[in-house]
């Protein structure tokens, strides 16, 4: 938990932003519902606890069944929750009071959980607006329905205010993301050094996740580790590691303060790239480096995405898989056949930061509009970059047989694509290379004190140093 001064300052800034949407006396209240524990099978056997992310940002109290109201007219924060009973203490030991937790976050007052309904009812009866964010869990949805009725709609004003704040990372947040990236570096190094032909993928996943649990909260999303990287989010880990394959490891760590990392590397399972693997891998490296070199204040990440698409098509043209004018192919969306996803996304307390508040509201400026084109249409972060943005840089090349067959059958972009030659890549898999990047006043920097090896020679050298190979 951060200092109460930080939480108080954030809430004061939120009040200032909301003041721009209505005159004094008619701004209403902002209602925040923290998460409850979620039973896995029965009430006392729950999934791993994780607090709601915007609650963490403004209040920091990492406990279930907490709620809060920020009075936007009176600039007053009240925390609502119940103190533990003696029955709770028998099982859990002595616990801090709600009042002490509220004081730790700089709140003005605290009250029992039951008082929340009365506070909301009073606000509604007085004609005051109740602002709330889109709920992401069933419990929160039910609470909001009980308090406000089933027809209540989330507040776009509150969403926009929260997004504008959480998009730009404070120095304390940057330090926490750097810390999460160090943990991510360590878990990825363990994963790379554990690639041993003959073992099951699951063994590597267990080692990686175990390290994050020993040193932080755990993984920031379920680990993607697969020799079938053409499946973008492959969470199946039941395959025996075979020499000559490519293994995609896309994994992030979450530290105890709940900030995330998100890295991807692709490794030759035998320790050395084949000639064909290396030439495709180098194209992805070049795209990754180009994107990083372009990342700076003033440019849109959509522009960066399109530039990397052009770079990718240049490389694929050089190996004979596509042909034609590069600009025409970019405009036609040819790159989407090989990279059906966007270049990157925002990252912070959530690994896909704030996408629960609306992907386009988070990732697009008001003057931007998402397109439907495969690849570009999946770009989660398109905004004009400013210092404080934290984004991922994750180009990839994938050979998806079903997608290639569909394009061939439907004649999509056939004037640019050598479908006959592509048949030789049906067993290739996929490559993705991802770094976490902070936009700075001068340009950008990679987050974390160390960067995972990415150039093919450096990857092979790092794999050769694995203890089991010595």
Image: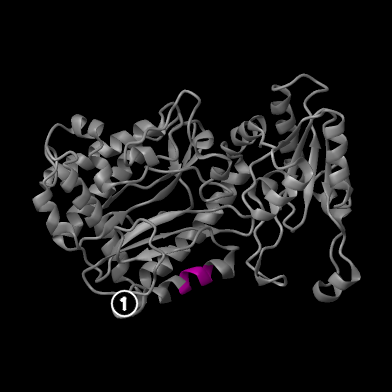
In the foreground, 181 or 391: 391
x and y, in percent, of residue 451 in the image: 41, 54
User: With 303 as the anchor, is 450 left or right in this view?
Assistant: right
Q: Main secondary structure of the magenta part?
A: helix
Of residues 251 and 286, which is closer to you in this image? 251
Q: Is residue 463 magenta?
A: no
Q: Is residue 59 visible?
A: no
- How far across and how far down the image is residue 257, in percent? 64, 55
- Where residue 344 sits in the image (x, y, percent)? 41, 43
Q: From what the image shows, is residue 70 above or below residue 431?
A: above
Residue highlighted by disc 1: 240
- Residue 358 seen by the camera: yes
Instruction: Indicate the position of residue 436 as horizontal and vertical percent values.
Output: 45, 48
Task: Name the residue: 61% across, 55% down.
Answer: 258
| Magenta stretch in the rendered image | 206-211
The C terminus: image quadrant: bottom left
Query: Looking at the image, which residue sits at the far front?
Result: 150
Query: Which residue lies at the image location 77% right of the left edge and 47% below the top edge?
Result: 146
* 137 or 84: nearer the viewer: 137
Q: Is residue 325 left or right of residue 366?
A: left
Residue 135 or residue 18, whichever sits in front: 135
- The picture quadrant where one finds residue 295 is top left
The residue sitting at 56% across, 37% down in the picture is 167
For numbered disc 1, what is the local secondary structure?
loop
Q: Residue furthest top?
A: 23
């Amino acid at each position: 938990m951060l200092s109460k001064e930080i939480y108080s300052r954030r809430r004061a800034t939120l009040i200032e932003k909301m003041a721009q949407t209505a005159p004094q006396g008619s701004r209403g209240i902002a209602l925040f519902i923290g998460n409850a524990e979620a039973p896995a099978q029965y009430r006392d056997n729950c999934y791993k606890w994780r607090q709601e992310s915007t609650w963490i940002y403004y209040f920091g109290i990492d406990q279930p069944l907490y709620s809060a109201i920020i009075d936007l007219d009176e600039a007053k924060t009240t925390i609502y929750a119940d103190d533990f009973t003696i029955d709770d203490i028998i099982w859990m030991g002595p616990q801090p009071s709600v009042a002490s937790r509220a004081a730790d976050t700089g709140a003005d007052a605290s009250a029992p959980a039951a008082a929340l309904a009365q506070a909301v009812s009073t606000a509604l009866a007085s004609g005051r607006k109740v602002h709330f964010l889109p709920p992401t869990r069933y419990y929160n949805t039910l609470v909001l329905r009980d308090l406000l009725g089933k027809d209540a709609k989330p507040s776009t004003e509150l969403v926009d205010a929260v997004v504008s704040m959480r998009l730009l990372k404070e120095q304390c947040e940057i330090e926490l993301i750097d810390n999460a990236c160090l943990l991510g570096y360590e878990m990825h190094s363990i994963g790379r050094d554990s690639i041993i032909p003959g073992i099951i993928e699951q063994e590597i996943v267990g080692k990686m996740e175990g390290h994050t649990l020993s040193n932080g909260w755990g993984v920031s999303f379920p680990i993607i580790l697969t020799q079938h990287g053409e499946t973008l989010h492959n969470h199946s880990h039941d395959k025996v590691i075979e020499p000559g394959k490519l293994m995609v490891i896309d994994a992030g760590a979450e530290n105890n303060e709940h900030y995330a990392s998100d890295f991807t590397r692709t490794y030759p399972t035998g320790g050395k790239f084949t000639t064909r693997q290396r030439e495709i891998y180098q194209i992805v490296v070049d795209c990754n480096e180009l994107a990083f070199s372009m990342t700076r204040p003033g440019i849109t990440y959509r522009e960066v995405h399109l530039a990397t698409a052009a770079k990718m098509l240049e490389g694929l043209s050089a190996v004979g898989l596509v042909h034609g004018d590069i600009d025409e192919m970019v405009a036609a969306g040819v790159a989407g056949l090989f990279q059906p996803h966007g270049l990157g996304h925002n990252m912070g307390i959530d690994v896909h930061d704030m996408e629960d508040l609306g992907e386009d509201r988070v990732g697009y400026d008001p003057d931007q509009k998402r397109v439907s084109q495969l690849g570009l249409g999946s770009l989660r972060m398109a905004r004009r970059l400013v210092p404080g943005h934290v984004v991922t840089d994750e180009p990839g090349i994938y050979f998806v047989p079903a997608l290639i067959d569909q394009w061939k059958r439907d004649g999509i972009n056939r004037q640019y694509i050598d479908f006959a030659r592509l048949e030789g890549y049906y067993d290739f898999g996929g490559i993705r290379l991802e770094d976490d990047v902070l936009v700075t006043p001068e340009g950008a920097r990679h987050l974390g004190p160390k960067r995972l090896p990415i150039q093919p020679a450096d990857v092979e050298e790092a794999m050769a140093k694995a203890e089991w190979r010595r």
